[in-house]
């Protein structure tokens, strides 16, 4: 009987630990979501027909001088084989493996087959590349979550020719 009780205690502790981790993850996700949303809304931006993120209306990109831009390339075949969620998974993966370029302007205004994410508050320079990619990855994960809830979708005509 003592062994059964001991095992049940471990299961309860695992459940409590698991619940605590989920609560901490949800809290962190809400904090990041609120921060990013406020940062995006408060940036000076321009309405454009080239912003790849859509809600009920086209979202606004920040001005180029307010941000660095992390750009991720897409193979053309992804247009037909990947959903918006899968495209954002690709973006997160590419950022995580440093398969990106950083520039002073959004590349999706100049060409197809790419998506540029704004990174604000980090000075330009090679010594900050990890911080730039980390912020871009966090933003990509946030957009991914927004897409999964159905609040945002990708305008494929901006990304793919």
Image (tube, rainbow, N blue to C red):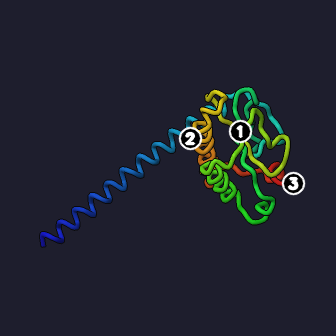
Assess whether mark 2 and mark 3 are in contact (beta carbons under 8 angstroms): no
Q: Nearer the viewer, mark 1 or mark 2?
A: 1
Which structural element holds mark 3? loop
Query: What x and y, as percent, mark residue 108?
Result: 80, 43
Label 3 – label 1 distance at C-alpha:
22 Å
Residue at (36, 56) in percent of width and height: 18
Q: Earlier in the sequence, mark 3 or mark 1?
A: 1
> Which tag, 1 or 2, sits closer to the chain's start?
2
Q: Nearer the viewer, mark 3 or mark 1?
A: 1
Check disc 1: other Cα within 10 Å, few if <14, some if 14-19, many if 20+.
many
**Secondary structure under badge 1?**
strand
CA neighbours of label 2 inside 10 A, class few (<14), some (14 to 19), many (20+) = some
Q: Residue at the spot x=79%, y=64% of the render?
A: 80
* Res. 146 visible in picture: no
Which label was assigned to residue 102? 1
Residue 78 in which image quadrant: bottom right
Q: Position of residue 60 (x, y in %)?
A: 75, 36
Q: Position of residue 148 (x, y in %)?
A: 62, 55
Label 3 environment density (alpha carbons within 10 Å; few <14, some 14–19, many ≥20): few
Say whether residue 46 is left or right of residue 139. right
| Label whose residue precedes the other's in the sequence (3 or 2) | 2
Residue 137: percent from left, percent from top: 60, 45
Compared with residue 28, is residue 83 higher up or lower down, i.e. above or below? Answer: below
Residue depicted at 80% across the width and 34% down the height: 47
Q: Using the image, determine if residue 79 lies above or below residue 100.
A: below
Q: Are marks 1 and 2 in contact (CB under 8 Å)?
A: no
Q: Nearer the viewer, mark 3 or mark 2?
A: 3
What residue is pinned by disc 3?
A: 161
Q: Quadrant of the C terminus?
A: bottom right
Which numbered disc covers residue 33? 2
Give the residue drawn at x 71%, y 38%: 102
Left or right: where does residue 57 sit relative to residue 144? right
């Amino acid at each position: 009987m003592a062994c059964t009780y001991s095992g049940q205690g471990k299961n309860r502790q695992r459940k409590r630990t698991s619940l605590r981790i989920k609560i901490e993850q949800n809290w962190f996700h809400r904090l990041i979501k609120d921060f990013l949303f406020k940062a995006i809304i408060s940036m000076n931006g321009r309405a454009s027909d080239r912003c790849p993120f859509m809600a009920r209306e086209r979202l606004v990109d920040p001005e180029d001088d307010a941000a660095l831009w992390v750009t991720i390339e897409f193979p053309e075949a992804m247009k037909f084989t990947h959903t918006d969620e899968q495209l954002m998974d690709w973006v997160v993966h590419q950022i995580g493996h440093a398969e990106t370029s950083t520039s002073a302007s959004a590349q999706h205004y100049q060409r197809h087959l790419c998506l540029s994410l704004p990174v604000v508050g980090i000075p330009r320079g090679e010594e900050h590349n990890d911080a730039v990619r980390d912020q871009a990855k966090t933003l990509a994960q946030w957009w991914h979550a927004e897409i999964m809830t159905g609040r945002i979708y990708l305008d494929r005509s901006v990304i793919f020719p």
